[in-house]
Amino acid sequence: MSDADDKSYAEVNQEALYRIFTLPEAPDSTLSRIEKDLSENLLGFLGDHIVAKEKPLQDIERDFEKASIPEDPQFVSDHTEFLLEKLVAHSVHTASPKFIGHMTSALPYFLMPLAKLMVGLNQNLVKIETSKAFTPLERNVIGMLHHLVYQRESSFYNRWMHSAQHSLGAFCSGGTIANMTALWVARNRLLKPDGDFAGIAAEGLAAGLAHYNYKRLVILVSERGHYSLSKAADVLGIGRKNLVAVATDANNRIKVDALKQACQNVREQGGEVLSIVGVAGTTETGHIDPLADMADIAEQLGIHFHVDAAWGGATLLSNDYRHLLNGIERADSVTIDAHKQMYVPMGAGLVLFKDPAMVKAIEHHAEYIIRQGSKDLGSHTMEGSRPGMAMMVFSAMHVIGRRGYELLINNSLEKARYFSHLIAEQDDFEVITEPELCLLTYRFVPRRVKQALAEANAEQVERLTPHLNALTRYIQKRQRESGRSFVSRTKLTPEHYHRVPTVVFRVVLANPLTTHDMLREIIEEQREIAEKATSLRGALHTEMRELGLIRDA
Amino acid sequence: MSDADDKSYAEVNQEALYRIFTLPEAPDSTLSRIEKDLSENLLGFLGDHIVAKEKPLQDIERDFEKASIPEDPQFVSDHTEFLLEKLVAHSVHTASPKFIGHMTSALPYFLMPLAKLMVGLNQNLVKIETSKAFTPLERNVIGMLHHLVYQRESSFYNRWMHSAQHSLGAFCSGGTIANMTALWVARNRLLKPDGDFAGIAAEGLAAGLAHYNYKRLVILVSERGHYSLSKAADVLGIGRKNLVAVATDANNRIKVDALKQACQNVREQGGEVLSIVGVAGTTETGHIDPLADMADIAEQLGIHFHVDAAWGGATLLSNDYRHLLNGIERADSVTIDAHKQMYVPMGAGLVLFKDPAMVKAIEHHAEYIIRQGSKDLGSHTMEGSRPGMAMMVFSAMHVIGRRGYELLINNSLEKARYFSHLIAEQDDFEVITEPELCLLTYRFVPRRVKQALAEANAEQVERLTPHLNALTRYIQKRQRESGRSFVSRTKLTPEHYHRVPTVVFRVVLANPLTTHDMLREIIEEQREIAEKATSLRGALHTEMRELGLIRDA
């Protein structure tokens, strides 16, 4: 479709336009060939089409700089060529087993044709009129994950799973919206209608605080809590300052005494705790808070207990490891991301509610949809129109099965422990946080520095660490740019290094295709890069000498 | 994968599990056949597999009632059969040209293989590390839609489109999150940092109100505003009562004088207006507020002006009709849903900001991603992890082109006018709201009642309307259940019927495949259903007689 002269444009193109809605691409077209390649050999396709060598971002931006929508239509095949060359080539090979820096892994093959089915059906889950069977399906998916967490008896699910006035949770675009929804519910339940006060949902936060005579609301989470909680505190009007970070122990778990004290402090100062948030799998270190102890405090003090298990929640699928999350079944609300360790594509977060009536606090209606008494899912979600992503989770749970997931999770955890041992064996690497799940952090430390650090005092650590941080940053960046493998990095404050901010490599070993050999190659590659970092190592050496930790010949 | 005895389960299934990540379905498998059908003849597939006759929801729910995750894996082909029979068969044929009750229409074919590509790549747009070229692409898409609305010069886009510290908007899962994001930005800019006050984002809403000495914040929108605004008022802590509905004229457009008065009232009472919201395409009637007049008021009074053009925004693509949205280019923020009249799959909302620095008000960072200075899109979005949906919008804009969209939009509007004329010609139907865009509302009214209504007084209208409402509800429900066609319904308060709540059919004529013949068939079918509604018509007849509007022989 193009090159039609202006006069007859409408006539000429009416037909062409109609065709894009009615006729598929020819079997030998570029797009059909891509589709076939994707179907037959996804990893091959990605390996062939995504270029390894990093192109500078500024150069990529030049391919995406025309701000006006093109006047004339482009042939699908031409456009597809453009996508292959300019977009796919410079995207990230998230499915690669050597890209272990993200929570995104390879996906099972059957989800790709299902994704096409989902798009072809193009249901809208906000209301039953545009989703029909997808509504019960989504309620079922929420029910299954609710059962995974809370393990209630079947009569419970028979009664509530499909009830119009109730919800066992909400399907969301991701964990951020899930966390936000949980805290929205908690906020609205805390400042609920009472006498003349119509409730915060109607009257607003300031009126709610005034009615209940609270100076402020506070959300308490460990200092390792996800940044989405701070965003939620902003959006919900609580204020980021009122998301109070509680200290963690040497294993990045919230200090229970400090949490209890923090709750008491808030109340003594005239505030109220909106929610205690437990983290089940911190984003940076993968550790799990002592959920049962936190549940005790929440129960004693009558505070909403939310667990952010966006990443670690899938561990519940393994009977061997679900005990790590003991206490989660006492949470009032729980966030799980199916697009993380449940191996479904991006866009599948869930929040679950222990009590199916909790969502009353955020219920809303309209005249044309989500009418009172309807089963429209939209009356209890933060989002409006939503795609049928729940099908992907439903299918994955059926095709993989609980025991299939158990194998995947167990393998990931074992692989992480293997990698941790492997690192510990090296005389020029060190583990910074041990894996509790399949996430660990580590860094490269030249042999002599490693020996020195073992006995270094706070001041020495403080002076050496910036050099090591620079080296870690350098290695991580170079390795990413070379395109063969990828680890991410973050900054921690390890207790055994006197809480000095320490940059570390961070790996998530969730991809079932990652092998032990690949892990060995990754650290070998890092060592090679480190060897070339002569000036950074020189500076480190100088610092070591100035600290009297080495004496040169 | 199943039937492995417990002992050797892990060994047996390790291999099977590995296979689902590495081997596609066989070409003759059920799923591969479905995929082929979808590719070759989507409408045929949907027509064949979605059953016409409605199955009672309770029966569908019985297929989705097992709350526990199945222990054992299921063969993909078995699961696919289940999906076909239990899910697809009872989903909604949103692409059908006779389903004109929703904003969801047929999709162009090329988007299906692209959806598969998107899922195969599984990029995460929150950070550049997991999206690379998808980040500039998404910024480009936002830039293109910004240009569509604001038509700034190319130097503007050269400067801001790819700037790390700025954003021309945010890509969202849908219009609700887009509206919420716009009002979040407006709220945070209104209660911005000032002297000792660190700003609402940090200190919370109550502190912000106290600092600026505002009794309350108010959002003003016409009584036809979308329910997502009320939800946003709740989430953001403003309170639903503080979303004040302003009266509309006979054409469902906000009364500008009433709006101005409302602003003044809020201020006189010690409050402040957080935002004036213009509606460009109301969900229920498709009308567009007088945006330029609203912009005048917002400018005069220094108030944030947001335009909710989730549905109508695509009209800007037609040079023939973009004047209907005159004034939108003066809005501080604009919501557009690409999954409505831009014909991309569910899950593509956008909010645009006139000023690229506005997003500073909601900026956030973390240690491991979206670090200060990075180009990670996540630092300016309400959501966290997000899929590469922007590719769908990008591709649709290129393959359809501005002029292609113009044809689609013009055709839709002309079709709506045709349908409106067709209805007006009938002696037993009446148009309730004329189409300004491609949306109109109407109802069935028996011939004699229609004649009587033309001269009825308020009391007579009030007594007749409930009967007509029941009849409209009945027809809409029966027609939906019969499965051949679908119109939606809503409740309006038409001025010419003395604002008596009136139930109406609501149609959206955006599907390019809908023909004039189909529209005739739809009203013919409605007439046939109406004829069978003997008891409802009997009650209406009795009411007519009691009102002295007819005398039986």
Image (spheres, coloured by chain):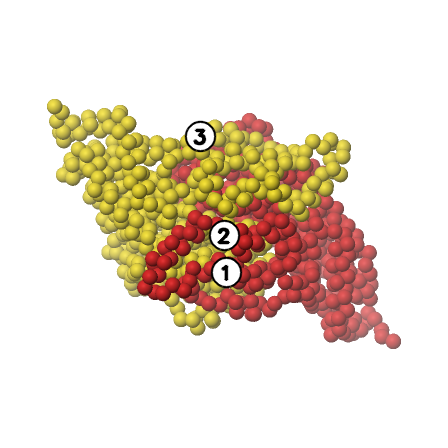
Chain colours: A red, B yellow
Q: Nearer the viewer, mark 1 or mark 3?
A: 1
- Secondary element under disc 3, as helix, strand or loop, is loop
User: What residue is shown with label 2?
Assistant: A25
Picture quarter with the N terminus of chain B: top right
Q: Amino acid at mark 2?
A: Glu
Circle 3 chain: B
In this view of the protein, can residue B31 be seen by the observer?
yes
User: What residue is shown with label 3?
Assistant: B55
Rendered residue at 60%/39% (across/down): B29
Dot 2 surroundings within 10 Å: few (below 14), some, or many (20 or more)? Answer: many
In the rendered image of this protein, does residue A546 appear above or below residue B94? below
Nearest the viewer among A352 and B402 is B402
Rendered residue at 50%/49% (across/down): B112
Circle 2 chain: A
* Residue lying at the far top of the rendered structure: B553
Q: Amino acid at mark 1?
A: His
Q: Amino acid at mark 3?
A: Lys
Nearest the viewer among A283 and A247 is A283
- Secondary element under disc 1, as helix, strand or loop, is helix
